[in-house]
Amino acid sequence: MAKLTTAFTVLFFSVGVAGADEFVANIKKVTGDKITINKSTVDQKVEDTTLTAIDKVKVIAKKPMIVDDGNGGFTIEFADVELDDGLKNKVFSKTVRAKIKTDAKNNIIEIRVHQGIQSLLDNDGGLDLFIEPPAVIRSR
């Protein structure tokens, strides 16, 4: 009986974990908790899909930090920052590339926004950050 219980427990957890997924896609539209994505690649075109986000979905972006290199110059480093306004952030007003994690029920549990340097620039060539401005210069 103990072996049977162990077998069912292993099977149960295997099925639960097997459904979770992580992938990169373009987020095309966010309406409430419904997120329209497209997983097309250069080699393969696919149709748009709409997934549902959980209530407390984590939305993470990179925050630029200006770092003093100690030799009179500086470098820019990026730190992960969770966006407080989540899916309501203005980054989702246009198509954005992101790494998306889903649970076993195919609900989105985490979004990591890929913010290239080009997406930081607005039409005038100035910085257009959708999160707070770069951190204050700090020494290494």
Image (cartoon, grey):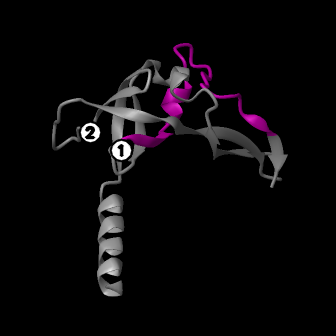
* Residue 53 rendering spot, x and y as whole percentages: 42, 34
Residue 111 is a magenta residue: yes
1 and 2 marks in contact (CB < 8 Å) = yes
Q: Which residue bears the numbered disc 1?
A: 24
Residue at image position (29%, 62%) is 15
The location of residue 122, given as percent across then percent down, is: 54, 18
Helix, strand or loop for the magenta stretch, by majority? loop
Q: Amino acid at mark 1?
A: Val
Secondary structure, mark 2, is loop
Quarter of the image with the N terminus in it: bottom left
Q: Is residue 126 magenta?
A: yes
Q: Position of residue 41 (x, y in %)?
A: 23, 41
**Residue, disc 2:** 39
Which residue occupies 39% across, 49% down? 103
- Outermost residue to the top: 124
In the foreground, 100 or 127: 100
First reached walking from the N terminus: tag 1 or tag 2: 1
Residue at 76% in and 37% down = 135
Magenta region: which residues?
107-136
Residue 128 vertical position relative to residue 50 in the rendered view, above or below: above
21 on left or right of 86: left
